[in-house]
Image: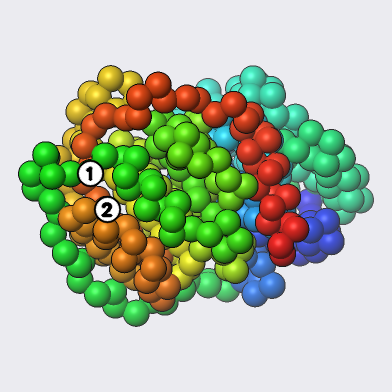
């Protein structure tokens, strides 16, 4: 058994000061220490997948990050671990508890995952070992993790057994207090034939995001492909998987790099998939984060099957979740106005209805995802 402070101090020496996670009773002493340490960043995520994506955003911004979770929530993190951190080669340290470990009595819902936790990591090509059980093990464990992360730029996991960390009291640090946000602004365009195409909205986003001052994250599907076709720039990141995680990735990146305006261009299907992250952005979203939801009421890139967004008020949801500003757009000119006034005291959201359809002969990015991430990190590092 170790003290939480011993591991956190050693992890800090290795560069880890940024944590995102979902609590577990096995993690309680460790997470209590992280929450109560003012020298650390702790982000309480709505689910484990968003914790991974937020930590990945912080890592892209130059802040080595830790994602913490219970193994029963590992399933929630499979998509970003396999199609975000693996594909884009984003290094993370994952700390996952081992509920339902063979031979350890636990609740029935943990039995299956307890048996397959190690195999889950191995199937995802994530090397893992046990979280250190004694003080002398901490440095070697972190060294092995650090060597792999430096060599492969991919996650490494530590699996925490029951009783691995001594009890630590909770000095609760709530989510940042925010002023009461203004009521949602504007009304949505009703007539479908008056709605702009996605490309027209993206052209306005490009014009409003200078390379030296901004980062643009485009969600999975036609949005990323169209952004690439219109302009391939060093400050762009095109999501190719982990649908719904663009906003949590943007949150981590915006917190890590307050000197950059981070613009997340989402779709209605992606926003619906991980709507719990709206609450996280409302609580933690910094003024340099702008969330643009382009809503064509369809999964456009898979054949335009309808989503359920027709009567969903994303601006109203953002307002209720605590976003500092929430706008309903009538046309592409609202993209200009919204992004020009991006510093709202917290994260801001623009909900803009668009038409289905895309550019003719739409290409796929020819630059590999890992190169896109490396290019962005080098761009940010050269201008830190």
Residue toward you, 370 or 12: 370
Q: Mark 1 or mark 2, which has the lower sequence index?
A: 1
Q: Is residue 91 left or right of residue 217?
A: right
Residue toward you, 37 or 345: 345
Q: Is residue 380 left or right of residue 320?
A: right
Q: Is residue 311 above or below residue 315?
A: above
Q: Is residue 342 above or below residue 51?
A: below
Residue 107 point in image, percent of width and height: 49, 35
Name which residue lies at 32% across and 44% down: 200
Name which residue lies at 18% across and 44% down: 195
Residue 203 point in image, percent of width and height: 39, 48
Q: Quadrant of the C terminus?
A: bottom right
Disc 1 marks which residue?
Answer: 196
Residue placed farthest to the bottom in the image?
A: 179
Residue 136 point in image, percent of width and height: 91, 50
Name which residue lies at 68% across and 35% down: 371
Q: Which mark is residue 332?
A: 2
Q: Are marks 1 and 2 in contact (CB under 8 Å)?
A: yes
Q: Residues within 10 Å of mark 2 (few under 14, many from 20)?
A: many
Residue 380 point in image, percent of width and height: 68, 56
Q: Which colour style is shown?
A: rainbow
Residue toward you, 315 or 9: 315
Residue toward you, 148 or 103: 148
Q: Secondary structure at mark 1?
A: loop
Rounded to the nearest whole Å, what is the CA distance between mark 1 and mark 2?
7 Å
Q: Is residue 331 above or below residue 240?
A: below
Name which residue lies at 37% across and 53% down: 204
């Amino acid at each position: 058994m170790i003290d939480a402070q011993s591991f956190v101090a050693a992890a800090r020496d290795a560069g880890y000061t940024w944590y995102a996670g979902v609590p577990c009773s096995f993690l309680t002493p460790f997470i209590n220490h992280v929450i109560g340490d003012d020298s650390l960043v702790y982000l309480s995520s709505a689910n484990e997948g968003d914790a991974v994506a937020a930590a990945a955003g912080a890592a892209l911004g130059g802040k080595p990050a830790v994602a913490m979770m219970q193994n029963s929530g590992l399933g929630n993190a499979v998509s970003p671990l396999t199609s975000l951190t693996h594909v884009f080669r984003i290094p993370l340290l994952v700390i996952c508890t081992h509920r339902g470990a063979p031979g350890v009595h636990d609740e029935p819902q943990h039995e299956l995952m307890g048996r397959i936790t190690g195999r889950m990591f191995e199937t995802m090509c994530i090397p893992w070992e046990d979280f250190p059980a004694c003080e002398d093990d901490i440095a070697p464990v972190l060294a092995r993790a650090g060597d792999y992360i430096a060599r492969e730029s991919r996650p490494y996991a530590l699996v925490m057994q029951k009783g691995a960390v001594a009890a630590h009291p909770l000095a609760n640090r709530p989510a940042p207090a925010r002023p009461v946000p203004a009521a949602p602004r504007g009304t949505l365009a009703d007539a479908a034939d008056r709605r702009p195409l996605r490309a027209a909205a993206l052209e306005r986003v490009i014009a409003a995001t200078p390379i030296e001052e901004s980062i643009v994250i485009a969600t999975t599907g036609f949005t990323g492909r169209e952004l690439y076709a219109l302009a391939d720039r060093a400050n762009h990141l095109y999501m190719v998987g982990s649908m719904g995680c663009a906003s949590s990735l943007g949150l981590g990146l915006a917190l890590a790099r307050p000197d950059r305006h981070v613009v997340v261009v989402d779709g209605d299907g992606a926003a619906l998939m991980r709507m719990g992250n709206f609450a996280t952005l409302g609580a933690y979203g910094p003024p340099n984060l702008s969330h643009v939801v382009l809503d064509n009421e369809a999964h456009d890139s898979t054949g335009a099957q309808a989503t359920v967004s027709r009567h969903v008020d994303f601006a109203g949801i953002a307002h209720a979740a605590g976003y500092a500003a929430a706008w309903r757009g009538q046309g592409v000119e609202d993209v200009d106005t919204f992004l020009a006034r991006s510093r709202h005291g917290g994260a801001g959201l623009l909900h803009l209805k668009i038409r289905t359809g895309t550019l003719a002969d739409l290409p796929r990015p020819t630059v590999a995802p890992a190169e896109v991430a490396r290019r962005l990190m080098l761009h940010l590092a050269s201008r830190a």
